[in-house]
Image: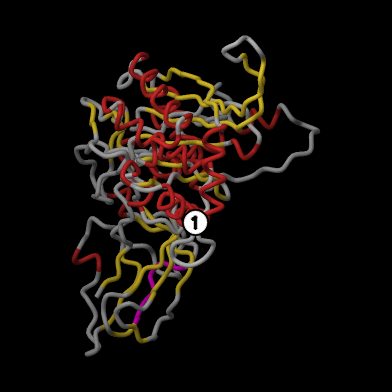
Amino acid sequence: MDVLMPQLGETVSEGKITKWFKSAGDAVKPGDNLFEIETDKVSVEVPSIATGTLTEIRVQVGAVAPVGAVVAVIAGEGGATAAPAAASAPAAAAAPPPSAPKAPPATFAAIPPRTPQPSGPLDPFFEVRTPSRNFGAARTTGGASVTPLARRLAGESGIDLSRVSGSGPHGRIVAADVERALADGAGRAGVAMASGMGAAQVKALYQGVAFEEVPLDGMRRTIATRLVEAKQTVPHFYLTADVTMDALLKLREEANADAPKDGAGAYKLSVNDFVIKALALALQRVPAANAVWAGDRILRFKHSDVGVAVAIDGGLLTPVIRNADEKSLSTISNEMKELAARAKEKKLKPAEYQGGASAISNLGMYGVREFSAIINPPHATILAVGAAQRRPVEAADGSVTFVSQMTVTLSCDHRVVDGALGAELLAAFKALLESPVRMLV
C-alpha cells in the first residue's frame, strides 16, 4: 500500500519530513511510528495503519511533499505492493526518489492549465489559503497560469505573482521564474518589501556594516504574510481601559494558598487564567461580539472559545481554550499550561489552535505597560494585556491613593464590532476582573 502525506488541517497543503523511524526493509505494524513531519505550525509523528514491510522510502529527510503525495510504500504480509502512484492518481505528483535531482518534477509544468478553484477558508492565526486539492493543475494569476510549486514558493517568499513574467509553456509561471524574481528582488510583497525595495536594494543601504542574514523559515514567512494582510484588510479600531486589580490579586493569593499542591487536583492560578475566564464570560454577556467575520456574513457563537498567544522559538501559536465560559479557573489554568507546553514543542494538533472567537495577547510578564495587538482573521477582536502596576488614583473623597492597575486594549474589526459594542464588551470584561467573585458563581 502507498503511504501518503497526511492532511494536518484545512490550510496545510504540504509537509516536511524531519525524521524516519523506520528504514527500507523494516517490518511494520499498525501503530508503529513511520516518520515525523513538520508544517509551519506543528511537528507530528505519523503511524502505520498496515502490517507488512516498508519496501520503499520515496521522500527523504529534509524534503517537502504536498498533501496526498506518496512518501513510502508498504508491502503486505504476502509481499505484494500497491499499484504505482502514477497509475492510481496521476494528478498527485509523487516526490522524486532519493537519486532524483531536487528540481521540480516536469509533470507540474506539463499539465495544461485548468479553471482555477477559489481559495479555501482562512486559518484563524496564520492566513494561508487552502490551495486546490489537484496538485498537478496550474492556477491563474492575472491571466497567467501558475504551477503549484511556483505558487508555493511565491507565497513563502512574499513574491507578487502579478509582477512575475512566466517562462513556461504558454507563458506559464514556473518555479524558476519565482526564484529569479526573488534573486532580483522583484515582485516582493512581504514586510520588508512594502516600500518596493528588494533584498539587494536593502542590503545596498548597509554596505560596510556588519550584519548576519537570517533565512526565513515557513513560520516566519507565514506570520509576515498573514499579519501584513490582516493589517491592510481588517479595519482596526482600538479601545483602552485601566482595570483595578486589587480584589483579583487578593482572591488569587487566597485561592493558590488553599489549592492542592500535588496530585490530580493540583493547580496554581495566574493572572492570565482570570483574564481568559473574564473575556469568555464577557463574550457571553455581549453575545453580538462573540463572533467572527466570514466574508459575506458574520458567524455568532453560543460558547466562548478563546485563543491565547504563546511565544515559541521563531514565532508564536495561539492554542484555543474551548468553552472557556463553562470551565472553572483551575481547569482553564491546567489546560492552558498543558497547551502552552505542547505549543512550544510544536506538538499541537490543528484542532487545538484553529478556530476561536477572540484571542488574548499578554505581554505583562515582560513589563510592557500597554500595546495594541493585530487581529487574527477571522476573529473580530483581540485583547492586548499589559502589566499590573501600582499607580496613584483619586479616591472618592478627593484624596490620592495607590492601587494595582492593568491597562488592556481591545482591537476590534469594525465590520463586526462597532464602537459602542466594543465598549460594552470591554466594560463587561473590566467589571468581571474588578469583581472577580462573579467568575466563581
Residue that badge 1 annotates: 267
Question: Picture coordinates of residue 64 (x, y %)?
Answer: 43, 58
Give residue 169's quadrant in the image.
top left
- Front-most of residues 363 and 148: 363
Give coordinates of residue 72: x percent, y percent: 34, 72
Question: Which residue range is magenta in the image?
Answer: 54-60
The residue under the point 35% across, 67% down is: 71
In this rendered view, identify the residue nearer to me: 125 or 135.
Answer: 125
The residue at the point 48 percent across, 29 percent down is: 434
Which residue is located at x 22 percent, y 90 percent? 78
| Left or right placement of residue 402 versus residue 52 in this view | right
Q: Position of residue 399 (x, y in %)?
A: 66, 12
Secondary structure of the residue carrying tag 1 is loop
Q: Is residue 347 magenta?
A: no
How crowded is the residue under tag 1: few (<14 C-alpha within 10 Å), some, or many (20+)? Answer: some
Q: Position of residue 162 (x, y in %)?
A: 39, 28
Quadrant for the C terminus, please. top left
* Up/down of 349 relative to 2, above or below: above
Q: Is residue 134 above or below residue 167?
A: below
